[in-house]
Amino acid sequence: MEWTAQTTTLFDCSSLLAKQGNLAADCCDSAVAPLTITHLSYDSRDVMPGTLFFCKGAHFEPEYLVKAVEAGAVAYVSEQDHAEYLKGAGIQAVPALLVREIRPAIARLAEFFYRGLTDQLTLIGFTGTKGKSTATYLLRAILDQWLIEQGKPNSAWLSSIENYDGVSCVRSLLTTQDVLELYGHFKNAVRSNIDYLTMEVSSQALKYGRTQAIPFEVAVFLNIGEDHISDIEHPSHEDYLASKLEIFKQSRVAIINRDCDEYERVLKAAGSCEKLLTFGCTDAADVVVSEIQATTQGLSFMVCSPEWQSRFTLPMAGQFNVENALAAIAAALALGVPLKHIQQGLASAEVSGRMQLIQGAPDKLIVVDYAHNKMSFEAVFASVAQEYPNRPIACVFGATGVKGLERRLDLPAVAVQYSDLIYLTEDDPLDEPLAQINEQIARVVREAGKTPRIIDDRSEAIERAIEDSPAGSVILVLGKGHETVMKRGKEAIPVPSDKERVETILSKLYQGDTRQ
């Protein structure tokens, strides 16, 4: 498939913003209105002749606009007039579209500039407090099995783990990228003849318009919890939930977890969609799971849908992952995927950093998981306790700096209920002192009558947990999962993933002894 940008002029852009009610002032005259726009960008490093440049972000500096103009930007969109700054830099008469709000302006102009592009893709979006990455990867595995048989390219995906669009496959630093990056991925997918793209859709992306006007064929609502409520994310649970529910306004098919909190509210919001499908453990759901069994290879369970009843296997630990698998099954049903491909996809699925069982420690079981909030902690610990009863549990975790402050109370409160050994360590401290974060967590552990071990270095903490735990232990390494950067201050420092850390430590400690 091929897609070519439609002819767009500065006048077109001005007219669209005016219709949107967002144009505060049009600082371009009739002489420049016919200017052809060939590229959109808010990154001065990504500018070419014909670019319409957006002055966006809390960290925007007028010097970025100067660099953009010098690189070929022909006009700019901004909430502020930068004519005097440009004049001081020796740049005269750059056309400007001044807007009341920059984010909706970007979304509207991107939708117009890339018109026709998303018509060539089937987009599936997963939203929820937990499980988005796993569900995205599970559906991706299902779709790829189906596409392989048809002789078509694999599907594309955008997640908090990595992004693949047919042209590149790179580690992700954000759950849902900003709007121009998203359209860039869509363009690559279309030009790579890809039919399906599955993506995580975060509440922040929905709240701030990163996915505005992007049409989802299927939108899946997994669950809702109390995470991400803070001064810099969502001020309240209501704001958090309302943001997530925005996804249904731009979706054709809604798929909802029948067992999630706020179900009636979610169901009402999904009423704007053409079709609705529910999944869950209750017979009231359209897609129902039963007979869940934990095995040495992973999980086995029965599923009954309106079309068939069959058994599935999933090569992962954690019974809560059955819910994610059920969401992927429901999405596959909505897309018309045959049963055999759904079964094959789930049986072969792998999700980096999600309930990964790592071999190599004699008489011990090590599980790496991305769990970093109350809901995911409760799910991981409860599942491990059920699947591996009467085995000692050691856990290694920390909490992020600055945001998600409730985790410093929630995470240790869950950990002390199940753990025999608790190791506190680094997990993206940002601009906050690590010692302060760990001490706040440790206080909760001590109040519960247990003694935490604080080890700032994450690899050392994991090694101590493996060495100190008794035979038969389950060692949970939680919080970072697949991530390969540690956020300290304003920097993202490259580090090994938790899986890589564990494998390196096991090689050092046991020198190839892989007895279990």
Image (tube, rainbow, N blue to C red):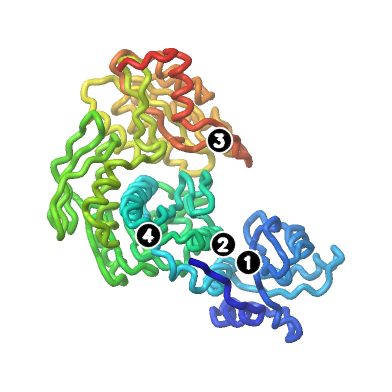
The mark nearer the N terminus, 1 or 4, is 1
User: Mark number for residue 40?
Assistant: 1
According to the image, label 2 marks what residue?
Answer: 180
Q: Which amino acid does label 2 sit on?
A: Leu
Q: Do the residues labelled 4 and 3 touch (CB within 8 Å)?
A: no
- The residue that disc 4 covers is 124
Question: Between disc 1 and disc 2, whose residue precedes?
Answer: 1
Q: What residue type is labelled 4?
A: Ile
Q: Position of residue 369 (x, y in %)?
A: 38, 34
Question: Could you say whether the residue bearing mark 1 is in a helix, strand or loop?
Answer: strand
Residue 240: percent from the left, percent from the top? 40, 56
Q: Residue 107's spot in the image, x, y percent?
A: 54, 68
- Whether residue 447 is visible here, answered yes or no, is no
Residue bearing mark 3:
486
Mark 1 and mark 4: span between their CA atoms?
A: 25 Å
* Mark closest to the chain's N terminus, 3 or 1: 1
Considering depth in this image, is 507 or 420 the residue closer to the camera? 507
Q: How far apart are marks 4 and 3 (CA)?
A: 30 Å
Could you tell me the amino acid type at mark 3? Answer: Met
* Whole-number angstrom distance, CA of label 2 to CA of label 3: 26 Å
Mark 2 or mark 3, earlier in chain: 2
Q: Do the residues labelled 1 and 2 touch (CB within 8 Å)?
A: yes
Could you tell me the amino acid type at mark 1?
Leu
